[in-house]
Image (tube, rainbow, N blue to C red):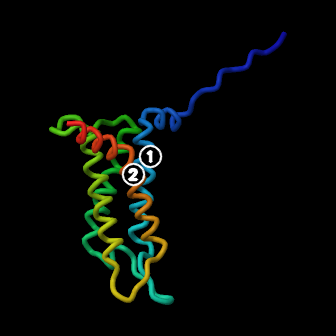
Amino acid sequence: MVARPTPRRVGRSRQRLNALSAKERVVGPATLVLLVSLWLPWFSIGPLSADGLGAHGWLFIAALDSIVLVLYVVIMAFGVGDLAEQGRLSKEQLLALITGVNLALVVLGFLLKPAGLSWSWGAFLALAASIVAFLPFGVPALEARRRR
């Protein structure tokens, strides 16, 4: 008698990830990387460095936006609810807006380099993460707006 293989059960964490759309699976980790990169060295001179929030205090808006986005993806993954359910904006428009604000703030912080300092790796990481987070929802929103 040959034993039948038991079917593999899909773990809960895999089910939670499957509940997210592909766009949300890109935005969540990219925004988490952006959030962490705000405290990494953005500008340096010799052995001294300054993080993004230390050099530009107004980047706390990007930090708050990033926290909201990461929490949104976690809430969607756990199936607790949908934060963008009852607003005037659709979920895609809301996520495009928030990631667009983050991108604009990071680009502004990147370009407004304090005099005498050079860029450090945290600024490049934040710039890349904000671009990656914006692409899934921002590009389709911009294309839809152009078609009108």
Residue 78 location, x and y as percent?
40, 38
- The vertical placement of 129 against 45, above or below, is above
- The vertical placement of 65 against 145, above or below, is below
C-beta proximity under 8 Å, tags 2 and 1:
yes
Q: Give the labeled residue for mark 2.
A: 133
- The vertical placement of 116 against 121, above or below, is below
Q: Is residue 120 left or right of residue 103?
A: right
The numbered dot on residue 90 is: none
Q: Give the labeled residue for mark 1.
A: 26
| Quadrant of res 90 | top left
Q: Residue at x 20, y 36 (%)?
A: 148
The crowding category of the residue bearing disc 1, from other C-alpha atoms within 10 Å (few below 14, some 14 to 19, many at least 20), is some
SS for callout 1: helix
Quadrant into which the N terminus falls:
top right
Q: Residue at x 38, y 68 (%)?
A: 38
Q: Residue at x 44, y 60 (%)?
A: 128
- The residue sitting at the top extreme is 1
Q: Nearer the viewer, residue 58 or 121?
A: 121
- Which amino acid type is shown beneath numbered disc 1? Val
Q: Nearer the viewer, residue 115 or 70?
A: 115
